Image (cartoon, rainbow, N blue to C red):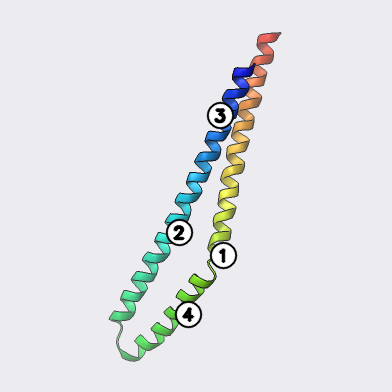
Amino acid sequence: GRFVGGSVANVTSAYTEVAALNAELAILEQKRNTMAKVDKTVANVKAAPGKAKANIERTVTKSVDAAVSAPGKAIDSLTNSIATSLRSAQDKAKSELDAAKKQLDKLQE
């Protein structure tokens, strides 16, 4: 019985590691996407003529400031998706543990 419990514990920690790596990747992806949008917007501003350019620059500055000062919303949604990933990993590990226990019970009958 020890082997089954140990292997399930290993599976659970592996799922947790995968979830943590996925979380890091999601954060990096989010940062990369944000930077790409900022770069693209800045390029558009540079290409815009006169008065429109001034208005766009103001809007972009506000948007960039908002994104920089309050990345909270993006981080919140990311945190939620991380929590969901962890929950699903834990659920999967638990169902595998339950299945292993059932098999063990059958062997002992």
Dot 4 corresponds to which residue?
Answer: 62
Give the CA separation, mark 2 to mark 1: 12 Å
> Is 72 in front, or is 99?
72
At label 1, the amino acid type is: Lys
Which mark is first along the chain, 4 or 2? 2
Give the CA separation, mark 4 to mark 3: 48 Å
Q: Which mark is residue 73?
A: 1
Q: Residue 50, located in which quarter of the rendered image?
A: bottom left
Q: Which mark is residue 91?
A: none
Give the CA separation, mark 1 to mark 4: 16 Å
Give the CA separation, mark 3 to mark 1: 34 Å
Image quadrant in which the N terminus is located: top right
Q: Is there CB contact under 8 Å for labels 4 and 3?
A: no
Seen from this angle, which residue lies furthest right? 109
Which mark is first along the chain, 4 or 1? 4
At label 3, the amino acid type is: Asn
Give the CA separation, mark 2 to mark 3: 30 Å
Secondary structure of the residue carrying tag 2 is helix
At label 4, the amino acid type is: Lys
Q: Which residue is drawn at 60% across and 23% down?
A: 6
Asked whether, in this view, residue 62 is left or right of residue 97, the answer is: left
Secondary structure of the residue carrying tag 4 is helix
- Mark 4 packing: few (<14 Cα in 10 Å), some, or many (20+)? few
Dot 2 corresponds to which residue?
Answer: 30
Q: Residue at x 29, y 87 (%)?
A: 49
Q: Residue 56, located in which quarter of the rendered image?
A: bottom left
Residue 87 image position (x, y, % from top left)? 62, 42
Which mark is first along the chain, 1 or 2? 2
Q: Which residue is drawn at 56% across and 49% down?
A: 82
Q: Which mark is residue 10?
A: 3
Q: Is there CB contact under 8 Å for labels 2 and 3?
A: no
Which mark is first along the chain, 1 or 3? 3
